[in-house]
Image (spheres, rainbow, N blue to C red):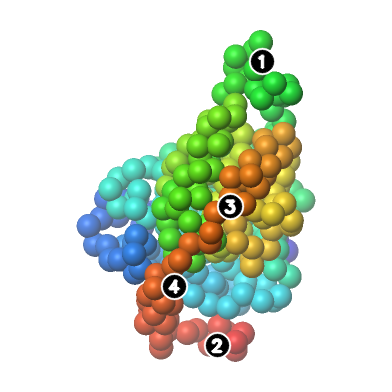
Amino acid sequence: MDTQELLAIAQAVVDEAEALFVRGVGTRERHEKAPGEYVTDVDVRIEEYARTMLIQLTGIPVYGEERGGSLGAEPVWVIDPIDGTANYAVGNPLCSILLSLLVDRRPVLAVSSLPLLGRRLTAVEGGGLMINGAPVARLAAQDKGADNGADKDSSKDIAQVGFSSLSSQTRCEYSTEARHRLLADLSRTHLRPRVTGSVGVDLSFAAQGIFAGAISFSPHAWDNAAGALLVGEAGGVVTDTEGQPWTPDSSGLVVGDHVTHALLLSTMRTALSSGAPCAAEQHEEQYVEYHEEQHAGQQHPKETAER
């Protein structure tokens, strides 16, 4: 199958996932899988449905937030059934379904659905960004002067950037204190940070040009892979937090137009250089235990073979 055929399958799977998603908004059926990290029964139902259908229709294994899997050089679907679960559980519309296809450890296909906002972003490598099935113009750099954002045209001062989470501790690279320091430093530039609680929303907004850029501190491919391709296909800059090409092993992601991306990286280097990595060993142990419990006895034949 070529990527367009695979995209059609992915969109059909997301169609049904959206129906499950919308029916469960505000669910109280949620559990804490690690400190500050929640999962709802809807997360699990969406991933199980998507996993079953994607393997059945394409023969390609799945790597997901709730049921795990394996990431390697071979093609693999990557899914976050509900990105922004804490938002979703209380009815906050800033949440999404993220699905991507990785080949040779890079995203070549992506779907980011924001069901409660009526937006679906899609892309295949080299094909540009589509929103609700229509192609969109590529991003333009924010035209800022050397005076840290002072500009006669006040509309150019509205440069929001996504800063999805201040306190998520699971497998994080930087402490909560370091993130607060970075937030304060960014607030002293012309940029206007926004804490949405959803990496998927941040990256989708950056791809659309709603946000001039975004930072993801998540080390997880299910959070970052789809958005990395979407922003790249929209003409944005996509790197890890060190300015190197993003990979599934990266500790985070920085995206934006060229000017904003450069400012985000330079501010991060200053603000985070003195911040110690977060001490989350206990949280990591609980996180791993949760995945081992959830994944035990539920491996599909193709996934088992992949390992």
The amino acid type, in three-letter code, at marker 2 is: Thr
The amino acid type, in three-letter code, at marker 4 is: Glu
The amino acid type, in three-letter code, at marker 1 is: Asp
Q: Distance of mark 1 from mark 2, alpha carbons? A: 57 Å
Nearest to viewer (mark 1 / mark 3):
3
Question: Mark 4 or mark 1, which is nearer the start of the sequence?
Answer: 1
Q: Which residue is mark 4?
A: 281
Q: Distance of mark 1 from mark 4, alpha carbons? A: 46 Å
**Which SS class for mark 3?**
loop
**Which SS class for mark 4?**
helix
Q: Which residue is mark 3?
A: 274
- Could you tell me which residue is drawn at 55 percent across and 54 percent down? 275
Nearest to viewer (mark 4 / mark 2):
4
Q: In the image, is 256 to the left or to the right of 43? A: right
Depth check, front residue: 277 or 199: 277
Q: Quadrant of residue 158?
A: top right
Q: Which residue is mark 2?
A: 304
Q: Are marks 1 and 2 in contact (CB under 8 Å)?
A: no
Q: Which residue is mark 1?
A: 151
Task: Estimate the x, y position of residue 45 in percent, counting from the top left.
Answer: 36, 67
Question: Mark 2 or mark 4, which is nearer the start of the sequence?
Answer: 4
Question: Mark 2 or mark 1, which is nearer the start of the sequence?
Answer: 1
- Could you tell me which residue is drawn at 53 percent across and 77 percent down? 69
Residue sitting farthest toward the left: 28
Q: Residues within 10 Å of mark 4 (few under 14, many from 20)?
A: few
